[in-house]
Amino acid sequence: QLVESGGGLVQPGGSLTLSCAVSDSRYSRNVMGWYRQAPGKQRELVAVMIDSNKLNYADSVKGRFTISRDISKNTVYLQMNSLTPEDAGVYYCNGYPRTLVPGYWGQGTQVTVSS
C-alpha cells in the first residue's frame, strides 16, 4: 500500500514536502519515483531515486525538486521548492520503471499552486 501526503495549497514560489509511506517492507529497496498528473494530462514521472547517488529529474523540475528516502521508515519524500502553477496536480509515488504492484496506484496527494 502506498499512502501519499503533504499536498496542499501554496502560493507561487512556495515550498511543500510530500511524503509517501510504503506499508510493505518488501519494497523498501525498490527503485521509487514520484509522478504527477495535471488536469487533462497524462501522468508523468518527475523524479526517480535509483540509489542515493543516482537521482533523476524531469527537466521541468530540475534544481527545484529533491527526492529522498528514509529506508528505516520505508518512506519516500519529495521536497518541492519555487513552485509554479505548472507544478499543480495530483502527486503519486510508485516503483520505477514498473509499479510495485501491477496496476496499483495510491490515492495521491493534491498540490495546488495559486495566489
Image (cartoon, rainbow, N blue to C red):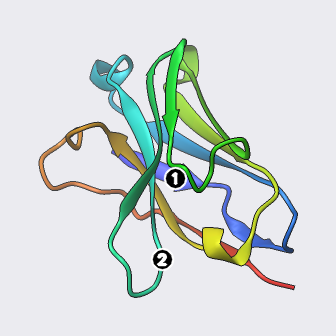
Residue depicted at 87% across the width and 62% down the height: 14
Q: Residue furthest front?
A: 59
Q: Earlier in the sequence, mark 2 or mark 1?
A: 1
Disc 2 crowd rating (10 Å Cα; few below 14, some 14-19, many 20+) is: some
Q: Residue furthest left?
A: 102
Quadrant occupied by the C terminus: bottom right
Residue depicted at 66% across the width and 63% down the height: 7
Image location (x, y in percent) of residue 26: 27, 20
Which labelled disc corresponds to residue 50? none
Residue depicted at 54% across the width and 12% down the height: 53
In the displayed structure, 31 sits above or below 87; it is above
Disc 1 crowd rating (10 Å Cα; few below 14, some 14-19, many 20+) is: many
| Nearer to us: label 2 or label 1 | 2
94, 48: nearer the viewer = 48
Which labelled disc corresponds to residue 38? 2
Q: Amino acid at mark 1?
A: Glu
Residue depicted at 42% across the width and 40% down the height: 33
Which labelled disc corresponds to residue 4? 1
**Disc 1, SS:** strand
Residue 97 found in image quarter:
top left
In the displayed structure, 50 sits above or below 82; it is above
- How far apart are labels 2 and 1 at the CA level? 16 Å
Task: Report whether 67 appears left or right of 93.
Answer: right
Image location (x, y in percent) of residue 21: 50, 39
Task: Report whether 9 appears left or right of 88.
Answer: right
Q: Amino acid at mark 2?
A: Ala
Residue 68 found in image quarter:
top right
**Disc 2, SS:** loop
Image location (x, y in percent) of residue 54: 49, 18
